[in-house]
Image (spheres, grey):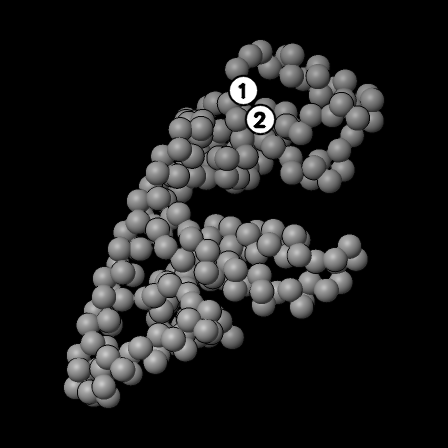
Amino acid sequence: MFRATWVKYGVKKHKVATPYHLKISGQAKISNREIKAIISKNVNAGRKDWSKKLDDALWAYQTSFKIPIGLSPYQLFYHKACHLPTELEHKALWALKRLNLNWNKVVNINLGQLNEMDELRLGAYDRANLYKEMMKKYHDRKIEKRVFKRGDLVFFFNSRLKLFLGMLKSKWSSPFKVSQVYSSRVLELENEDGSLFKVNRQRVKLYVGPIDSITSIDNLYLDKD
């Protein structure tokens, strides 16, 4: 059905984005983590009444101040701070007395508030971008640069061993030869029998050393198995 839709609208290349995989959204992860932390402080020992505490937890999250945007989600949506019902009743009575039901004046005030709301959201968007840039710089400083070229020997990370890990067994497979380097962070590796397969460069690391020592280590693991 998806392929037929792509052909109908002339989509030649489909890319996976965050809406298709909500788990890879950093903002969604942080929001869920904060809500879970709020609920964990209010539930009972049996943790069976979490559904009753969910509304209060969401209210607390939406009215709390967020550093990345410089205000609360409630204020970002409604352009005003959150007030209790008694405060709202007092403000409504005060507004009626001051405006004296002058609808022209009310319309002008509402238009001005809508414009201020747009400015507030644009400011929050700029602050969020600055915060993301700062976090990206902090994160990129800790990333190890991996540069490969054809003919290099690399270790390949075997993700299956994370589930079935043997005693003292390395998660890195024997060195493979780099056959081709692509610009899309993909490497083509060559086995000893000449077969080729493609992997992401984040799953490999450069091997520096004699190949004989690696062969002896693999034989040692095979003997123990």
Reply above or below: 7 against 19. below
Residue sitting nearer the eye, 9 or 90:
90
Most extreme residue toward the right, as rendered?
A: 224
Reply above or below: 164 against 147. below
Amino acid under disc 2: Phe
Give residue 111's position: percent from left, percent from top.
Answer: 20, 76
The tag on residue 99 is: none
The tag on residue 155 is: 2
Mark count = 2
Give residue 141's position: percent from left, percent from top.
Answer: 40, 28
Give residue 199's position: percent from left, percent from top.
Answer: 53, 39
The tag on residue 207 is: 1
Q: Is residue 152 left or right of residue 120?
A: right
Whether residue 117 appears in this view of the structure is: yes
Secondary structure under the numbered disc 2 in the rendered image: strand
Amino acid under disc 1: Tyr
Bin the neighbour count of mark 1 within 10 Å (Cα to Cα): few under 14, some 14-19, many 20 and up.
some
Q: Earlier in the sequence, mark 1 or mark 2?
A: 2
Separation (CA) of disc 1 from disc 2: 6 Å
Residue sitting nearer the eye, 173 or 167:
167
In the rendered image, the quadrant that contains the C terminus is top right
Q: Residue at x 19, y 87 (%)?
A: 102
Give residue 115's position: percent from left, percent from top.
Answer: 21, 69
Q: Residue at x 35, y 38 (%)?
A: 134
Residue sitting nearer the eye, 190 or 30:
30
Please tell me in which quadrant of the rendered image residue 210 appears: top right
Q: Residue at x 27, y 51 (%)?
A: 126
Q: Residue at x 40, y 58 (%)?
A: 72
Reply above or below: 106 against 129. below
Cβ atoms under marks 1 and 2 closer than 8 Å: yes
